Image: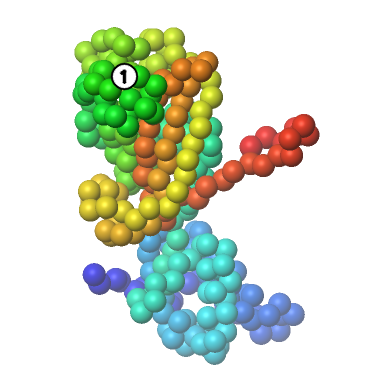
Amino acid sequence: MGYLVPPAGDVQGRLDRMSPVSVHIQLRELFRAYITGHAKAGSQLPSERDLAVHFGVARMTVRHAIEALVDEELLDRVVGVGTFVSHQKLDVQVKLTSYSEEMQRRGMRPAARTLSFEQIPATARLARELQMEEGQAVIRFRRLLLADEEPMSVDENFIPAWRVPGILDQGPPTSLYNLLSERYGLVIEWGEDIVEANAATPSIARLLKVDVGAPVLRMERHAFVSRSSVDYSISFYRADRYKLRVPLQRPGVRTRRSY
């Protein structure tokens, strides 16, 4: 794949040689202004050599400034290719809100592409996870979730069919948890998540537009109403777009901090 390397002249600003601020720090802030104000996520930064010539400094000085922004996760280095503007990583927070609610809260446009919405017999594993008998009817709802038209995750939900009669009649819902609450009175009260690192399989890689074997976050969730399992889901998140945030608190200590 070829990348279009922009000219160093695209980075606006000048260095003040009389300033007490170090040259590499001045460069860092010029690069930061370029990244946040002009460059698009995924675009390539001008080459270190061109930047060194443009600003009249040593290449090591340019590298020092770039490495500081790599540490801040504003830039990504790809060995043998170049330096790229990072995509913002979204927190996967362990809470029971719907995807559409969460993306809207972040100012992004949520969308979803339904991959399957059907009734299937519970396998031995699904029966165990949903606390039901093997072979009983289960609703399977599999989607590709997007934000600002970019694939973010593949989600697969399994719900005991007896809890949601007629759910297939009106087509896939835009917000599953809202539908469960408003139509069926199933307000999810609590849940348990298991998060692990996986390598993208060919099918997941194709949907998420990442390389086969690329790292993904796999989240397995059990959602409950009272003590009954209502929803069992498996999600695969792009590891280059998400990071896991886990609030911690000492047992018995109250805090007013809002997460």
Q: Using the image, determine if residue 248 lies above or below residue 42.
A: above
Q: Position of residue 94 (x, y in %)?
A: 53, 37
Q: Position of residue 46 (x, y in %)?
A: 41, 75
Quarter of the image with the N terminus in it: bottom left
Q: Secondary structure at mark 1?
A: loop
The answer to whether residue 64 is left or right of residue 129 is: right
Q: Nearer the viewer, residue 125 or 249?
A: 125
Q: Tell me what residue is drawn at x 51 percent, y 18 percent.
A: 227
Q: Using the image, determine if residue 131 lies above or below residue 30.
A: above
Q: Tell me what residue is drawn at x 28 percent, y 33 percent.
A: 142
Q: Amino acid at mark 1?
A: Glu
Q: Is residue 248 visible?
A: yes
Q: Tell me what residue is drawn at x 77 percent, y 32 percent.
A: 252
Quarter of the image with the C terminus in it: top right
Q: Which residue, given by chain and number where applicable, does mark 1 sit on?
A: 133
Q: Nearer the viewer, residue 93 or 137?
A: 137
**Direction right: furthest residue:** 253
Q: Position of residue 248 (x, y in %)?
A: 67, 42
